[in-house]
Amino acid sequence: MTSPAHPLFLGNHPAIDFLNTYFAPNGVPTETIPDGRALLDWMISAGLIEDTAAKNLMRRLGGEAIDSAAAEARKVREWARRWLERWRFAPEQDYGEEIAILNRLLARGAWQREVVVTAGEGFKLAERVGIDSADALLALIASSIADLITQERASLVKQCAGAGCTLWFLDRTKAHKRSFCSAAVCGNRAKVAAFRERQRA
């Protein structure tokens, strides 16, 4: 295993970015949430929790409990990857077992409903999980997965077409023709490879 790398936020959705916390460019494994501190940092960057809440949770529970949550999160991630790999090609199938697991993860959070004021949109009913336990972290991750499968089209969840790339993304382009995790990286490499192939021909 290589040394921990910085997480990538190329997926256009927190659930997809969560899958991308582990990737293997050209077969080289890269883990970006090896421990609890890294998990909290990722969740802050992903917009799932606020920095203050993360610090309070770490101070209250301690590093060992947060490390255990990170270990469980990695297991959830690989379970979700296997499921979403099938779901994106066959969303009409019965995924009763997977939904039951997801619902159990959601139930681990103490969800709170409240009315909030949004700029230019008036009132909105929001649902949040109380950040007071390690279980809340898993519930928040489960919530992002639930949002993906209920709010997004399965066909728009894609894997990068770049050679040796294992990253996923949600294609939000207007024509839904996006093929690469990053046009500047994998997309450019594909263009260079195609150019060289034409030159050889």
Image (tube, rainbow, N blue to C red):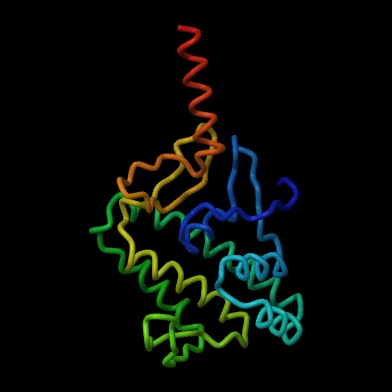
Q: Residue 66 versus residue 171: which sits nearer the camera?
A: 171
Name, please, the residue furthest toward the left.
Answer: 92
Disc tally is 0
Locate residue 200, reporting x and y percent: 50, 8
User: Taking 198 as reference, is 138 above or below it?
Assistant: below
| Residue 126, quarter of picture | bottom left
User: For this view, does 55 lie left or right of residue 90?
Assistant: right
Query: In the image, what residue occupies the spot 31% across and 69% down?
Result: 96
**For the C terminus, which image quadrant?**
top left
Locate residue 136, reporting x and y percent: 56, 81
Query: In the image, what residue occupies the spot 42% across and 92% down?
Result: 115
User: Taking 57 as reference, is 156 above or below it?
Assistant: above
Query: In the image, what residue occupies the spot 36% across and 49% down?
Result: 173
Name, please, the residue furthest toward the front.
Answer: 120
Locate residue 74, reporting x and y percent: 59, 62
User: Taking 74 as reference, is 24 above or below it?
Assistant: above
Query: In the image, what residue occupies the spot 73% across and 45% down?
Result: 2
User: For this view, does 190 lie left or right of residue 3?
Assistant: left
Locate residue 4, reporting x and y percent: 72, 53
User: Taking 59 as reference, is 84 above or below it?
Assistant: above
